[in-house]
Image (cartoon, helix red, strand yellow):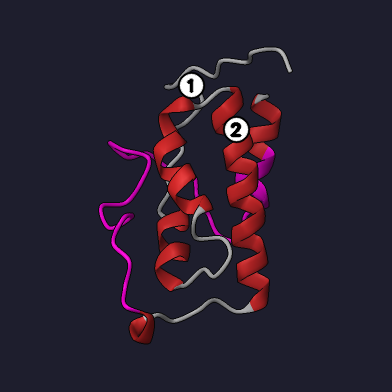
């Protein structure tokens, strides 16, 4: 499972490695009004969708600590905007030597 998570992190278009006190940004649950939103281009929207799907799988297998943030991002994959992208790129998955990865055997 650790290899899969590293593949997800390394496969994203921007660097999402790092450390933070929480796995999500403070503005995660704040959504702009429709007229203020700047939607993502197709390439970044597809990358966003794929990465959120992969992170959802990770939350169910071994990283329950990121579940709230990832589940919220799943509600944004249909029509993501720049704020969603920023939330994902600021999504910090702590280094593997500091947080245990629990593989439940799938």
Q: Is residue 19 part of the magenta span, yes or no? A: yes
Q: Is residue 103 above or below residue 2?
A: above
Q: Which residue is identified by label 1?
A: 97
| Residue 23, percent from left and from top | 37, 40
Image x and y of residue 21, in percent: 28, 36
Q: In the structure shown, which secondary structural element does the residue marked by tag 2 occupy? A: helix
> Residue 44: which quarter of the image?
bottom right
> Considering only vertical position in the picture, is 54 above or below 64?
below
Tell me the CA gap for discs 1 and 2: 17 Å
Secondary structure at badge 1 equals loop
What secondary structure is the magenta-colored segment mainly? loop
- Sequence-earlier tag: 1 or 2: 2
Quadrant for the C terminus in the image: top right
Q: Please state which of the two labelled residues, at mark 1 or mark 2, is closer to the viewer.
A: 2
Please give the label number shown on residue 50: none
Q: Residue at x 48, y 44 (%)?
A: 70
Q: Measured from the top left, where is residue 50 in percent x and y? A: 67, 54
- Find the residue positioned furthest to the right: 106
* Residue at the (41%, 28%) spot, across then down: 65
- Judged left or right of residue 28, residue 67 is right
Residue at the (48%, 43%) spot, across then down: 71
Where, by quadrant of the figure, is residue 14 drawn? bottom right
Is residue 39 in the magenta section?
A: no
Q: Which residues are magenta?
A: 7-33
Q: Is residue 3 left or right of residue 65?
A: right
Q: In the image, residue 12 lies at what x, y percent? A: 62, 54
Label 2: how many residues lie within 10 Å, few (<14), some (14-19) or many (20+)?
A: many
State which quarter of the image contains the N terminus: top right
Q: Residue furthest bottom?
A: 35
Which residue matches tag 2?
58
> Residue drawn 68% across and 51% down?
11
How crowded pointer 1 is (Cα within 10 Å; few <14, some 14-19, many 20+) is rated as few
């Amino acid at each position: 499972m650790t290899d899969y998570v590293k593949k997800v992190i390394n496969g994203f278009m921007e660097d999402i490695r790092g450390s933070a006190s929480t796995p999500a940004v403070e503005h995660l649950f704040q959504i702009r009004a429709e007229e203020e939103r700047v939607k993502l281009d197709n390439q970044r929207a597809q990358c966003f969708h794929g990465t959120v799907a992969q992170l959802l799988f990770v939350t169910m297998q071994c990283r329950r600590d990121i579940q709230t943030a990832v589940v919220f991002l799943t509600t944004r994959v249909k029509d993501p905007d720049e704020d969603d992208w920023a939330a994902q790129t600021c999504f910090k998955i702590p280094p593997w030597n500091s947080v245990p990865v629990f593989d439940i055997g799938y």
